[in-house]
Amino acid sequence: MSEVKPVKWGILACGGIAKAFAKAVNQTECSVLHAVAARDADRAQAFGAEYGATRAYGSYEALLADPEVDAVYIATLHPFHLEWMLHAFQAGKHVLCEKPITMNLREAKRAQSMAKDKRCLLREAFMYRHHPQTQKVADVVKSGVIGRVRMIEANFCYNSGVNPESRLQAKELGGGAILDVGCYSMSFCRLVAGRDQDRLFSEPLELKAVGYLDPQLKTDMWTTAVMRFEGDIVAKATAGLRVNADKVGVVYGDKGRIIVKDPWHCQGEIRVELDGGGEPEVFAADTSRSLFVYEIESFVGEMRGQPIGGSEVAMRYDDTLGNMKALDWWRSEIALSYEADRV
């Protein structure tokens, strides 16, 4: 039997999230960091030296022209995801792209179409969706121990201060709470609602939202969406860039509840509390491996023909499209509600 060669990764853009990914690649047995690219050659060289990349390029085009690169991790700013995914597919590269996959559903569908045409694998890099903690939440929901799901809460907020030129807040750079962290809370609600209905995910039947748009930047800074899913499940997804709030996911059933502390970084615990009383069942998160390691192993496994993501909670592309559709809906509601407030 021939030895399975590790996947050679190329990383486009050398920002903070790329550093976490590069570190994780070096912790896997299935992958190696072959190349990195930045707009500035010196920055690429420094990044490559720090994380042991074989090659460092001063342009994204040069990395995509490297015939030894098998898969590309795209860590550019949100508005440039689609452009570089399309270039990567033209070069015959598989793509793992940071969330949100694109700026809207239309762009996500275009990326999917070219990936299919070029027979390349395309996945959205939702790292928490590959972690055993997330699978445990789905398993507890499906088991029925808390009964049928009635309500879901998912919060992802932090305070980035007032920074109008940052990629988090500038509209032209893809800023806004919904795209940056609301994508997580929305994906959690859709996942849990789906598991209650014995599906992998579910789509909202109704969605109403309010929030605050910075009057100068026209980007959303804090916002909440309330949804109704099949089975009369009501969900609340919250996102914020200028407010600290507990990072938590809560699933309320008619027999109990599941409390997930820090569902996005999987550094906390899961508590299952039943209405009848008794000691709660507590599951501690496994923090021995990076979230990105699970994500990389899932992607490489799929490249090699294994089941999608290795688990039912991994982010499939139909799930990505559903999430983008819901995010588009949420963003449109914010714009409409904000205008209505000022009529």
Image: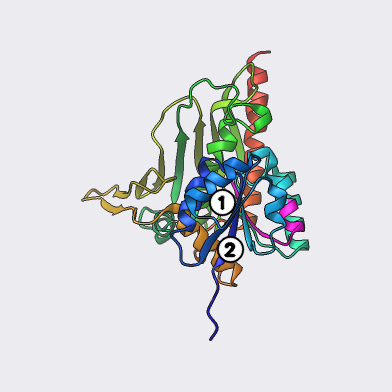
Q: How many marks?
A: 2
Q: Is residue 132 visible?
A: yes
Q: Is residue 226 magenta?
A: no
From the viewer's perspective, tell me whether residue 97 is left or right of residue 222.
right
Rendered view: 203 above or below 2: above
Q: Residue at x 64, y 63 (%)?
A: 70
Q: Position of residue 249 (x, y in %)?
A: 42, 43
Q: Is residue 308 visible?
A: no
Which residue was labeled with disc 1? Answer: 125
Q: Is residue 87 magenta?
A: yes
Q: Position of residue 100 (x, y in %)?
A: 61, 43
Which residue was labeled with disc 2? Answer: 8
From the viewer's perspective, tell me whether residue 67 is left or right of residue 260.
right
Q: Nearer the viewer, residue 311 or 202?
A: 311
The magenta stretch spans which residues? 86-99
User: Which labelled disc corresponds to residue 66?
Assistant: none
Mark 1 and mark 2: Cα distance apart in space: 17 Å
Q: Residue at x 44, y 53 (%)?
A: 291
Q: Residue at x 50, y 57 (%)?
A: 295
Q: Nearer the viewer, residue 227 or 298?
A: 298
Quadrant containing the C terminus in the rendered view: top right
Amino acid tagged 1:
Ala
Label 1: state its secondary structure: strand
Please tell me how crowded label 2 is: few (under 14), some (14-19), or many (20+) other residues with Cα within 10 Å: some
Amino acid tagged 2:
Lys
Give the residue at the far top of this rendering.
343
Please tell me how crowded label 1 is: few (under 14), some (14-19), or many (20+) other residues with Cα within 10 Å: many
Q: Position of residue 311 (x, y in %)?
A: 49, 64
Q: Nearer the viewer, residue 254 or 22?
A: 22
Q: Residue at x 63, y 16 (%)?
A: 215
